[in-house]
Every structure is written in C-alpha cells, then in structure tokens.
Image (cartoon, rainbow, N blue to C red):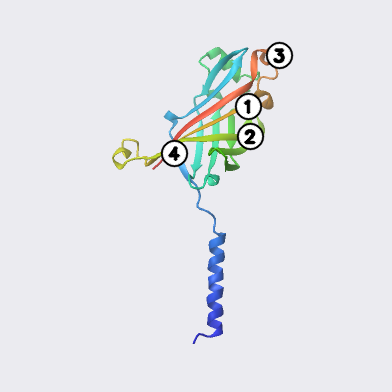
Amino acid sequence: MKSAHSGFVFLATLALVSAAALGAAPAAAESWNVDSSHTEVNFSVNHFFTPVNGTFDEFDIDLAYDAGNPTASRVRVTIPVGSINTRNERRDGHLLSADFFGADDHGEITFESTSVKAADDGSLIATGPLTIKGISREVELPITLLGIKDIPAEMQEMLGGAKRIASFKASTTLDRGDYEVGTGSWAADVVVGSDVDVEILVEAHLR
C-alpha cells in the first residue's frame, strides 16, 4: 500500500511537469534562405500623370516563416538607398540628393516586424517600424503567400539543396511626405506624386 507521502510526491511531480509543458515557449519559426536572383523590391510613383517605375538593386531580407503558426513568423528588410535604379542616371542621382532621400546621411531604408497576424482573407499582416530618411513610422505590410512546394529529392541538388520553396508578395502604398522625401522642393511637390506604390516579391527556400 502506497503511503500518503508517496502520493503527494507523485502529484507534485505531475503538477511540475504539467506547468513546465504549459509554460514552454512555442518552437521558433524556421529561417528561410531568400533567393536574391528571384526577389525584387519595386516601386512606382507618378511624374505628373505618368507612372515611373523603379527598383532597388540591393537588399537584405531576413525571413522566418511558420506555415502552421503564422503569428510566429517575422521579417526584417534592409535596403541600401544608393542601389535605387529607375533606368535614368540623372534622375537616380537627383533621388539620392538631399532633395529626396539624402543618401549621404541616411543610407538605408529598414523595416522590422514586431508582430505578424493572419488576415481574414488568408494573407498575413506584418506590423512594425518603417524607417526612411531617419524617420520611423509604424506601418502594416500586407503579405500574400503566392505558393509553397516541397521539392522532390531528385531535384534538390539542382536547386542548391532546397527542400522546400515558398514565394511571397508584400505590397503597400506610402505617402512620401510622411518621410520628408522630396518635400523640400516646390518642384518636387508639384511634379512628383505623393503616393508611392511599393511591391516586394520574395522567393525563399529551406534546406
């Protein structure tokens, strides 16, 4: 026959194990390797009424994505302003000047999510500070999963060891005036539109 002490020890041990299990932190989202050759950071802004498209040729994207628990996901984006490319050297030089981005003093654009939540339509919304020209504002960045696929074993070596591929699209519209980009020149205010459409296309893989 078990003693009362033995029963107490058993219950106490069970309680401790249960508490540890309930308090255990969820597994961290896996870090995905971004394929820069199939990733783009694009923007479009009107010159009077005509959309002018551009891109940033350089970027660093740190992505952790958990398909089973999207709220555990996170993203950090760093973009060197000097990599701006609108296919017009004179215009790019002007955009880098103090009239617009002031790249000499503010060399990077950054975004880092502080939370990620699932929207009703199945997309994700990453919320966090976006910093441009030294000004930080919290934004919501909608992200759509374009697709996710397991790679057959016979194809993995050809794809650099990738075992799973996922593609994402993030898009938003920014008011450049919120970041004092192009607000110091009356000509820029009149000629260039206020709204800037931003689209980030990301292809990433797990090894």
**Measured from the top left, where is residue 93 in percent x and y?**
57, 16
Q: Residue at x 64, y 27 (%)?
A: 133
Q: Residues within 10 Å of mark 3 (few under 14, many from 20)?
A: few
First of labels 1, 2 by sequence position? 2
Q: Which residue is mark 3?
A: 186
Residue type indicated by callout 2: Val
Number of numbered discs overlaid on the protein picture: 4
**Measured from the top left, where is residue 156 in percent x and y?**
32, 39
Query: Which image quadrant for residue 101?
Result: top right
Residue type indicated by callout 4: Asn
Q: Which residue is mark 2?
A: 139
Q: Are marks 1 and 2 in contact (CB under 8 Å)?
A: yes
Judging depth in this view, the residue of 108 and 196 nearest the camera is 196
**Mark toward the viewer: 1 or 4:** 1
First of labels 4, 2 by sequence position? 4
**Measured from the top left, where is residue 149 in percent x and y?**
39, 39
Q: Secondary structure at mark 4?
A: strand
Residue type indicated by callout 1: Leu
Distance from the alpha carbon under mark 4 to that under mark 2 = 24 Å
Q: Which residue is mark 1?
A: 174
Residue type indicated by callout 3: Trp
